[in-house]
Image: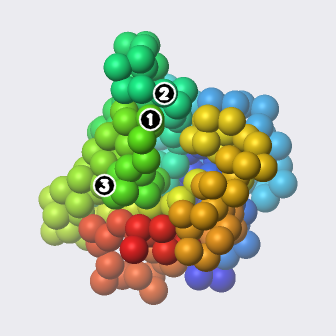
Amino acid sequence: MRLEGKTAIVSGGASGFGAGIVRKFAVEGARVMVADLNGNGAEAVAAEIGGVACKVDVSDGASVNAMAEAALTEFGQLDILVNNAGITHPKGNLEDVSEEDFDRVFQVNAKSVFLTAKALVPHFKAQKGGTILNMASTAGVSPRAQLNWYNASKGWMITATRTMAIELAPDGIRVNALNPVAGETPLLASFMGEDTPEMRAKFLSTIPLGRFSTPEDLGNAACFLCSDEASMITGVCMEVDGGRCI
């Protein structure tokens, strides 16, 4: 029960890594708001863990503010914010990515962190403590070709995590990130270009431990970084990647 008595928001919590984090947090005693653009999916996961669901577009300020208000009304206070929601663009040459896809990637992967910070950092400062966990990626550390602008958005996330950690430390707020390698999530096919046995074998050959990240892997790492066991850890971008970035 490492998170007993704590409250959390997990964006993108209806599927993939986000759902793994939600389930782990609940098992460890946290009360969790499952926030997702997929409202029905959020409701289903929230019902499973006895949490609260919230439909949110993390790229829209008004929607993020409504999510923050709903969480604070429901919980009374917030201890943990997990910025997990993310998307990618179709795999292809950097010059062929559409402006619309570029904008959407940065709105969801980068602007969302700005918006949740504006909405919830004042609350964390007022209570003199809180934990923010951002979902970055090995793509921001060791980029793969033809995912250029997605890679760049995750590199932005890593830098944002570190600068947030430095600025917010005096207020007792810790900020860390996770860098997963690709996993069995809705984005896997987009990362590989096509989901075939041959493409999976090629992708897995770059991961020393020989498997994809799982939602459980990310849930375990997130639980540690958001628990009091990690009270001296801030500004860390932890690879959960089976050794890919070595």
Residue 143 or residue 41, whichever sits in front = 143
The residue lying at 69 percent from left, 57 percent from top is: 201
**Residue matched to label 2:** 92
Give me the disc on residue 234: none
Q: Quadrant for the C terminus, please.
A: bottom left
Q: Amino acid at mark 1?
A: Gln
Q: Is 209 on the left-hand or right-hand side of 160? A: right
- Of callouts 1 and 3, the N-terminal one: 1
| Residue 123 % position (x, y) | 34, 51
Q: Is 149 on the left-hand or right-hand side of 56? A: left
Residue 143 or residue 53, whichever sits in front = 143
In space, the residues marked 3 and 2 are separated at their CA atoms by: 23 Å
| Residue 147 % position (x, y) | 44, 37
Q: Amino acid at mark 2?
A: Gly
Label pair 3/2, CB-CB below 8 angstroms:
no
**Residue matched to label 3:** 158
In space, the residues marked 1 and 2 are separated at their CA atoms by: 5 Å
- Of callouts 1 and 2, the N-terminal one: 2
Q: Is 236 on the left-hand or right-hand side of 32? A: left
Looking at the rendered image, the disc whose residue lies closer to the viewer, 3 or 2, is 2
The residue lying at 34 percent from left, 58 percent from top is: 141
Give SS at disc 3: helix
